[in-house]
Amino acid sequence: MPYTPQQPAYSRAALAPGMIGALVLLFGLALADWYVYVLYAVSILALILCVFAWQAKKRWWLAGLIPIAVLWNPIWPIPGLTGILPLISLAAAVVFVCAGLLIKVPTDTRR
């Protein structure tokens, strides 16, 4: 009897952006000269995770990811937050890791 593999019901598309975002946040603490690039990377990866959370119908993750995208936004920075961002980077890294591990995007079973 031949084995026919089944397509998985979900994919962990948010895992890579979540882990990369956490690493960028943690390495950004040491890269003070390049912190503007850290801001760009964190805000873009947070928005990517927002899209995956929306697709997975886990909209409560948006409550943690949208503030990260807004706070680390390098285009329109919020005055007075530049000194606080390194302090809350660890909390944002935890949000990135948890979102990456727990967001499962359903796969399209129609062909």
Image: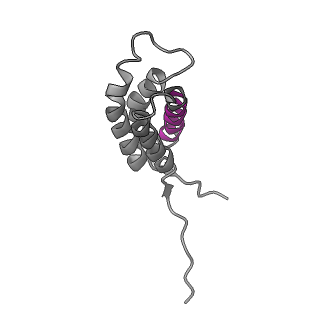
Instruction: Quadrant for residue 90, please give it.
Output: top left
| Furthest residue toward front | 33
Question: Is residue 41 depicted above or below 82 in this figure?
Answer: below
Seen at 50% across and 44% down, the residue is 17
| Image x and y of residue 111, in percent | 67, 59
| Image x and y of residue 57, in percent | 46, 40
Does the magenta-highlighted stretch encompass residue 50? yes
| Furthest residue toward bottom | 1
Q: How many labels sit on residues? A: 0
| Image x and y of residue 95, in percent | 36, 37
| Furthest residue toward right | 111
Does the magenta-highlighted stretch encompass residue 29? no
Seen at 39% across and 38% down, the residue is 26
User: On the rendered structure, is 40 left or right of 95?
Assistant: right
Question: Is residue 85 depicted above or below 103 in this figure?
Answer: above
Span highlighted in magenta in the image = 39-54
Seen at 55% across and 82% down, the residue is 3
Instruction: Quadrant for residue 32, please give it.
Output: top left
Query: Which quadrant of the rendered structure holds the N terminus?
Result: bottom right
| Image x and y of residue 50, in percent | 49, 35
User: On the rendered structure, is 59 left or right of 41?
Assistant: left
Seen at 50% across and 31% down, the residue is 38
Identify which residue, 99 or 29, lies in the foreground.
29
The secondary structure making up most of the magenta span is helix
**Coloring scheme used:** one colour
